[in-house]
Image (tube, rainbow, N blue to C red):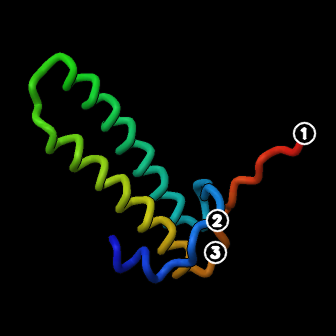
Amino acid sequence: IDALNDSLPALTSFVLPGGGNASAHFHLARTVCRRGERLLVHLGEQEDLGELPVMYLNRLSDALFVFGRWAAMKDQQPEPIWQPAST
């Protein structure tokens, strides 16, 4: 994850899902992973799960984010950047 991340442009804003087909799929997978992480945290409040399952899903979501950014770069697709609405 770190090696791929080091090859990417520095982030200056939030990245939105997109950046080509492969990138969008990685971002979608990350969304599902994060949902699972939240459910696991909730379950962990009721059952003793230990810390490893949540740590694993958190790191997996990090990996999927970096893979999505890397796929956009490899496909030469611009990454959609979040632009806050001006008031």
Instruction: Say which residue label 2 marks.
Output: 12
Q: Nearer the viewer, mark 3 or mark 2?
A: 2
Q: Which mark is residue 75?
A: none
Where is 78 relative to 52, above or below?
Answer: below
Residue 10 position, x and y percent, is 57, 73
Badge 2 local density, few (<14 within 10 Å), some, or many (20+)? few
Residue at the image point whose x is 31% and y is 48% from the top: 58
Q: Secondary structure at mark 3?
A: loop
Dot 3 amino acid type? Gln
N-term-proximal mark, 1 vs 2: 2
Residue 84 position, x and y percent, is 77, 47
Specify the quadrant that holds the N terminus: bottom left
Check contact, mark 1 vs mark 2: CB within 8 A. no
Instruction: Say which residue label 1 marks.
Output: 87
Dot 1 amino acid type? Thr
Dot 2 amino acid type? Thr
